[in-house]
Amino acid sequence: MFLYLYTYRLKCHLRDKPNIFWTLLFPILLATLFHFAFSNLMSERTMAPIPVAVVEDQGWQNDDGYFRAFMSEISTGDHPIINLTLGSQDETLSLLENNCDFPWALFPQRCFCSPIIFG
């Protein structure tokens, strides 16, 4: 009796074409797409550090240390995120105007919460 019911239900499932697609083919297709999409996810990629110029003014000197520690942490190490350049306001503005390699400048004296960023 079990074998009869099993074969009968199997025939019913095989006659339903959308059921075959969603239960058999779609998971295989989805697994294949995920494999190709995420197979090189952990491979070694290097990103060039972003040049950032920071005005070393009174706001930079009077900082409680968290902002400076954060900036130094992301600019050092094996894979730095930014290339930090400290200078006066005139030096920073001249880097922005004359050098295309420096798209960002931070002026910490204005306000720590919302520094003026030129880009």
Image: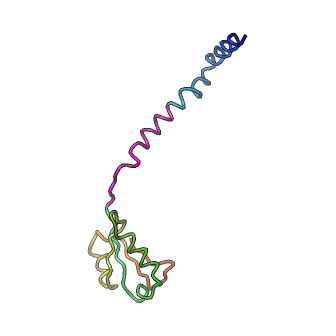
Residue drawn at the location 64% of the way across and 16% of the way down: 10
Q: Position of residue 43 (x, y in %)?
A: 36, 49
Q: Which residues are magenta?
A: 29-47
**Quarter of the view holding residue 70:** bottom left
Residue 31 covered by magenta stretch: yes
Q: Height in image: 76 above or below 7?
A: below
Q: Height in image: 61 above or below 54?
A: below
Q: Quadrant of the N terminus?
A: top right
Q: How is the image coloured?
A: rainbow
Q: Position of residue 115 (x, y in %)?
A: 46, 78
Q: Position of residue 32 (x, y in %)?
A: 46, 34
Observer-nearest of 44 and 57: 44
**Quarter of the view holding residue 75:** bottom left
Q: Quadrant of the C terminus?
A: bottom left
Residue drawn at the location 68% of the way across and 11% of the way down: 3
Q: Position of residue 25 (x, y in %)?
A: 53, 27
Residue 53 covered by magenta stretch: no
Q: Is residue 119 left or right of residue 11?
A: left
Residue drawn at the location 37% of the way across and 65% of the way down: 81
Observer-nearest of 37 and 3: 3
Observer-nearest of 110 and 35: 35
Residue positioned most to the left: 98
**Quarter of the view holding residue 26:** top right
